[in-house]
Amino acid sequence: METFIKQYTTTKLTDLELIEIPKIKDSRGNLAVIEKECIPFEIKRVYYLYDVPSDAFRGGHAHKELFQFLIPLSGSFEVRLKDGEEERLVSLNKPDKGLLITPGIWREIENFSSGSVCLVLASDVYDEADYIRNFDEFLLFKGL
Ligand code: T46
């Protein structure tokens, strides 16, 4: 187990992936499908953020083992990502493009557009013990 956790202390921003969700397009609109091969984990939980005020700040934590895939089902928002050494801002605004966030990455989510919906597919059930909600503790987790 320790080796497993250790592995995620070394994750970098380069491990993050913007994944295009396959879609079927015709005159009636688009139908996007997420099947097994689209994301590299088994989905154990789905939740979504909606009615988020534009000045709200969500996230502000990292996960020790949880993988998540964020999809802007509607509207847009920004995800600020940190691996302890580098920082990257990703704008999510297309419902057929999602962001895979590996464990060991700090995320802050902001600038939600009006009516936006952030759908999250997660690799495990909710477990508060998997969260690192303090940035100094996050740096310790990363060995920095
Ligand atoms: C993440 C971003 C994208 C639950 O009881 N069950 C759940 O499945 C979740 C996700 C949260 N909660 C509780 C925990 C807190 O008492 O709901 C409350 C709000 O959660 P939190 O402040 O963590 O919400 P966000 O939007 O800051 O973060 C959430 C996820 O927690 C997090 O994993 O990456 O969305």
Image: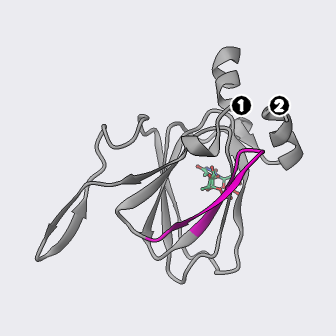
Residue 142 drawn at (x, y percent) = 78, 34
Q: Give the side of residue 137 with respect to residue 52, left or right.
A: right
Query: What is the distance, in whole Å, between disc 1 and disc 2 at their CAs?
Result: 7 Å
**The one of 12 and 34 positioned closer to us in this rendering:** 12
Q: Is residue 20 visible?
A: yes
The residue at the far bottom in this view is: 114
Query: What's the residue at 22%, 63% (across, down)?
Result: 31
Quarter of the image with the C terminus is: top right
Q: Give the side of residue 90 with respect to residue 40, left or right.
A: right
Residue 5 drawn at (x, y percent) = 68, 24
Q: Secondary structure at mark 2?
A: loop
The numbered dot on residue 40 is: none
Residue that mark 2 sits on:
143
Q: Residues within 10 Å of mark 1 (few under 14, many from 20)?
A: many
Amino acid on which the number 2 mark rests in the picture: Gly
Q: Give the side of residue 112 with respect to residue 62, left or right.
A: left
The chosen color scheme is one colour
Relative to 88, say whether 52 is above or below: below
Quarter of the image with the N terminus is: top right
**The one of 123 and 23 positioned closer to us in this rendering:** 23
Residue 100 drawn at (x, y percent) = 50, 48
Q: Quadrant of residue 20?
A: bottom left
- Ligand 1 is within 8 Å of the C-beta of the residue at disc 1: no
Amino acid on which the number 1 mark rests in the picture: Thr
Q: Residues within 10 Å of mark 2 (few under 14, many from 20)?
A: few
Residue that mark 1 sits on:
9
Q: Secondary structure at mark 1?
A: helix
Stretch in magenta: 78-93
C-beta proximity under 8 Å, tags 1 and 2: yes
Relative to 5, say whether 35 is above or below: below
